[in-house]
Amino acid sequence: MKKLVVFPNDPLLAYYKKGEIKTRYFNPKNFFNEVHIISLTDKEIDSGKVQVMAGSAKLKIYPVGRVLSIKNPFLFFKKYKQILEIIKNINPCAIRAYNPEINGFIATKCAKTLNIPIIISLHGDFSEMRNFPLRYRFIKLKELKNHLSFIIISKLTEKYCLQNANLVICVSKFLTKYAQKYGAKKTEVIYNRVYFEQFKKSFISTNNKKLNILTVGRLEPQKNQQTLIRAMQNINGELTILGNGRSKEALKKLSMTLCIENKIKFISSVNNNEIQKFYWKADIFAIASLWEGFCIPVLEAMATGLPIVVSNKEPLVEVLGNTGIVVENNPKDFTEAFLKLQKNPKLRKELGEKAKERAIKLDGEIMEERELNVYKKLIEKK
């Protein structure tokens, strides 16, 4: 009986609300018979609504509540003992944590105590995440407390997690430098899973009149959608912004200030199993992020066969390879790239085909198989 304990990045309820319920996300190729989720929240979703994330395995969720409290400094030790006892009773063959913060710290501590192999997943560079809001002054006073808490906790936990993990899975080559800087002994690059079959379409648009440009991502300062909105001022077309977040009202206000609100379309959220329909309607895909850990939408656009324009940031350039257009992160350069693609349908088709070919090499089936092999090797060594 193969059992896996998972410490997810967020409560599963948050995955559900965002429409990010992905088949076998926690159980590659249905390798495990049981998947047990340790969720650091008081209230969780019914397991039946997220069962697909565990594939064919039996799924059980343990909402253990918050583990940190300024008012009660002893809460952590109480919760740690509770979680340790839960894991001891499960007796898993592996533990997986999806960040090196407090989730990963508890997971690693339990794994070392019980002599269970531990995998830490890296989806972002925490040093960049700590510095970004302060560097770009994108943090509000009411958010400062939470950000300072993140800075302190992550600095206390990340080194311990990365040094003691049996394996650190990085979602891009770019992140391996960060992992190794903090002492990771063994790293493996496995891109986030995007399945080509879900996104492929039979033709690539050569429309050279009114362009349909798509961008997908959280509406946060990091994603920098305002650059794309400004780039639309001299474009005959429409920009669809798919995502939700705290920047939404500011972005809407910007489009009205520029008098181009008729060119900007906002869509808050879409279920993962329907998101491909928006890519199919697009002529061009664009991302203007200031930093990323991976950026799944770029790979989704590649699988669709769209010509892609991205800001000159890693790992966007790494994922895209030589299959798209890389520009400096300003409205002028994005506008020029859009106009270039609008005037040259042949180039759009050529870039779309190259992107699709690269997406096939990075297909979710390949990544899922790679993840399966990681678990097999880890468990065999136990």
Image (spheres, helix red, strand yellow):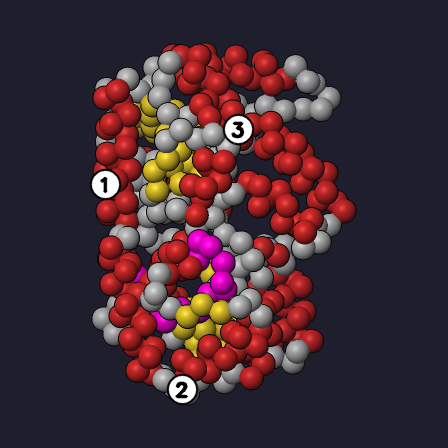
The answer to which quarter of the image holds residue 357 is bottom left
Up-down relation of residue 300 to residue 333 (above or below): above
> Of marks 1 and 3, which one's residue comes earlier in the chain?
3
Residue 265 located left or right of residue 5: right
Magenta run includes residue 308: yes
Residue drawn at point x = 50 percent, y = 64 percent: 311
> Which residues are drawn in magenta?
303-316
Q: Amino acid at mark 3?
A: Lys
Pick whichever, 332 or 63, lies toward us. Answer: 332
Q: Which mark is residue 112?
A: none
The Cα–Cα distance between marks 3 and 2, rounded to whole angstroms, is 50 Å
Q: Amino acid at mark 1?
A: Glu
- Between disc 3 and disc 2, the foreground one is 3
**Where does the N terminus fall, quadrant-wise?**
top left
> Of marks 3 and 2, which one's residue comes earlier in the chain?
3
Q: Amino acid at mark 2?
A: Lys
Pick whichever, 248 or 221, lies toward us. Answer: 221
The Cα–Cα distance between marks 2 and 1, rounded to whole angstroms, is 41 Å
> Badge 3 is on which residue?
159
Location of residue 74 in the rendering, given as x and y in whole percent from the top left corner: 65, 14
Query: Secondary structure under badge 1?
Result: helix
Residue drawn at point x = 52 percent, y = 78 percent: 335
> Badge 1 is on which residue?
369
Location of residue 47 in the rendering, given as x and y in whole percent from the top left corner: 39, 33
> Badge 2 is on which residue?
343
Residue 23 visible in the snapshot: yes
